[in-house]
Image (cartoon, grey):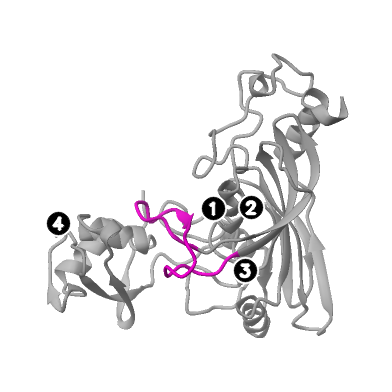
Amino acid sequence: MAKPIKVDYERVTRHEFDIHKEAALQRIDIYIHKRIPEYSRTLVQKLIKDGKITVNGHSTRPAYEINLGDRIVCDLPKLIEPHVVATDIPLAIVHEDDHLIAINKPPQFVVHPAAGHWDDTLVNALLHHCGTLPETDEIYKPGIVHRIDKDTSGVIIAAKTLRAHGALTKQFQDREVKKAYRAIVEGEVKFDEDVIDKDMDRHPKDFEKMAVVKKGTGGKSAVSFYRVLERFDGFSYVEVWPKTGRTHQIRVHMGSIGHPCVADSTYGRRDALFLRDLGVEEDPAVADPKEPVLMRQALHAWWISFTHPGTGEIVEYSAPVADDMELTLDLLRRHRPSRANT
């Protein structure tokens, strides 16, 4: 049973949205939920009825269809329940000291509590392991200074003290943190290395997705550098260094040059990768050829470097590629070697 969410009307955050053409003719309750997903559609409907969400300065109703030119103002109360609970979930610890902890997050592991995941996230596991985590204004994200997608694996950093949290958060905001990801992408990437400099914004028709937009049209700057590690017949293994930290940046950028991550159900060409997609019926490493070899985007947060908040020294941590991606690479090497090498 879902745990009840309570709100604190004494602590309010204002969100304002100016509606452009592509967002028009949607129900306002659906639109707000998509833009601010931690507020469920049911809660949004209640807040509309309570007068906390207005259109053009006037109260509205949940079924209202927003129009071009509308200005929506949301005075949203702080979510205060359910409380974050400690859960005994094993963690792959890369590094830990008195200031921070680095974890190799497996795929299908949500970072922080939200609707549908109140007690089975990385934060729940960290709270159990560490005992306490520094509390911030975001009550469901104690200790969290950055995040990676649920289905992306790899190294993620959490702060163990409030001072460390502030120092690390500032480094991320100032773009002083360096990160490298590794991905298996569709197709054989033409250049050995290149820079993708394409602005990004919310997808015009689906606010749960991101998209590349023309420069000067209101999007945010997004820059990624990539280099090819290995090429296969129909696939490539790449390393990507994002210079900015936009939502889904690597997935969107690689897709924009025709090479989306393999098994990316949102931005890619297929939801999963099977042996048959590699042109083979069986392999000793795959117990059941009918089951997917890979069923999440082939993206791994491989390396991160920043200034340690306790020592002031530059540190770096890395996490080995997750088992499902390593298996996929082994299969590609056996069954889909690059035609240039044959």
Q: Which residue is mark 4?
A: 63
Q: Are marks 3 and 1 in contact (CB under 8 Å)?
A: no
Name the front one of labels 3 and 1.
3
Please give the residue where the numbered disc 2 appears in the rendered image.
89
Q: Cα distance, mark 3 to mark 4?
A: 37 Å
Q: Amino acid at mark 4?
A: Ala
Mark 4 residue element: loop
Q: Position of residue 108 (x, y in %)?
A: 58, 46
Q: Which residue is at 12% across, 68% downward?
A: 60
**Disc 2 and disc 1 in contact, CB within 8 angstroms:** yes
Up-down relation of residue 13 to residue 256 (above or below): below
Sooner in the amino-acid sequence: mark 3 or mark 1: 1
Question: Label for residue 120?
Answer: 1
The range drawn in magenta is 200-222
Question: Which element type, helix, strand or loop, lies under badge 3?
Answer: loop
* Residue 41 can be seen, yes or no: yes
Horizontal side, residue 47 vs residue 37: left or right: left
Residue sitting at x 87%, y 29%: 341
The CA span between labels 3 and 1 is: 29 Å
- The residue under the point 28% across, 71% down is 18
Which residue is denoted by mark 3 in the rendering?
244
- Residue 311 lies in the magenta-colored region: no
Amino acid identity at mark 3: Thr
Closest to the observer, 162 or 152: 152
Q: CA distance from mark 4 to mark 1?
A: 34 Å
Q: CA distance from mark 2 to mark 1?
A: 8 Å
